[in-house]
Image (spheres, helix red, strand yellow):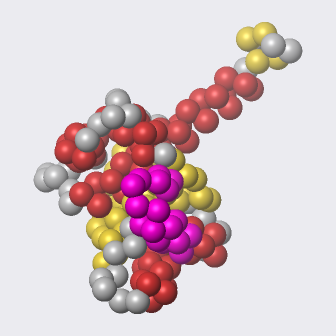
């Protein structure tokens, strides 16, 4: 069973979600938010790094999945988001955890069936997929969606590898 740590990066709030996945089965392990507040920016990056490191030590994930940066209307925000992602990715690589990255559209498509899903749709689908009693907080739901997206992607790769083994010289056995 793979344990996947999903991350929704942010320079003030970094959402995290941890799931176990095997075949078509999902198990919710935990979620929440690393809150770094109003500290100076380098201190916030350090807090993100430390928070991710603690999560990796607590849950021992085999895989780490994170949302890619999108450039919105504010280039300064995009740069800060990129640095927050960098702090999280470094924490994962320092612990030798496999890192994968997904666009917001890929994540929404994997969880809600459409790349144009809104936050409420993503939250509701995360709740349903993981059979949660309540709707998760927005940042945590986004991070759980990243983890679910990675689980689907991972499962598809496993299926493709199995199909490739059944193929000999371009013909199916």
Q: Quadrant of residue 89?
A: bottom right
The residue under the point 50% across, 54% down is 68
The residue under the point 41% across, 53% down is 72
Q: Which residues are magenta?
A: 68-88
Which of the image's four quarters has the C terminus? top right
| Left or right: 139, with 25 as reference point | left
For residue 15, above or below residue 130? below
* Rendered location of residue 108, percent (x, y): 37, 39
Q: Quadrant of residue 99?
A: bottom right
| Left or right: 80, with 17 as reference point | right
For residue 125, above or below residue 46? above
| Left or right: 99, with 110 as reference point | right
Residue furthest to the right: 169
Of 49 and 159, which appears nearest the observer? 49
The residue under the point 46% across, 62% down is 75
* Rendered location of residue 136, percent (x, y): 21, 56
| Left or right: 18, with 153 as reference point | left
């Amino acid at each position: 069973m793979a344990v996947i740590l999903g991350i929704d990066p942010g320079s003030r709030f970094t959402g995290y979600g941890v799931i176990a996945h095997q075949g078509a089965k999902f198990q919710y392990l935990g979620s929440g938010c690393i809150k770094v507040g109003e500290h100076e920016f380098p201190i916030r990056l350090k807090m993100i790094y430390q928070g991710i490191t603690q999560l990796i030590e607590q849950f021992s994930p085999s895989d780490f999945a994170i949302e890619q940066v999108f450039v919105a209307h504010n280039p300064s925000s995009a740069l800060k988001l990129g640095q927050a992602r960098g702090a999280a990715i470094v924490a994962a690589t320092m612990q030798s955890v496999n890192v994968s990255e997904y666009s917001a559209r890929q994540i929404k498509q994997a969880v809600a069936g459409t790349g144009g899903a809104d936050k409420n749709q993503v939250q509701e689908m995360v709740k349903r997929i993981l059979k949660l009693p309540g709707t998760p907080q927005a940042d945590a739901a986004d991070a759980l969606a990243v983890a679910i997206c990675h689980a689907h992607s991972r499962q598809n790769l496993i299926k493709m590898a199995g199909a490739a083994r059944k193929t000999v010289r371009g013909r199916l056995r």
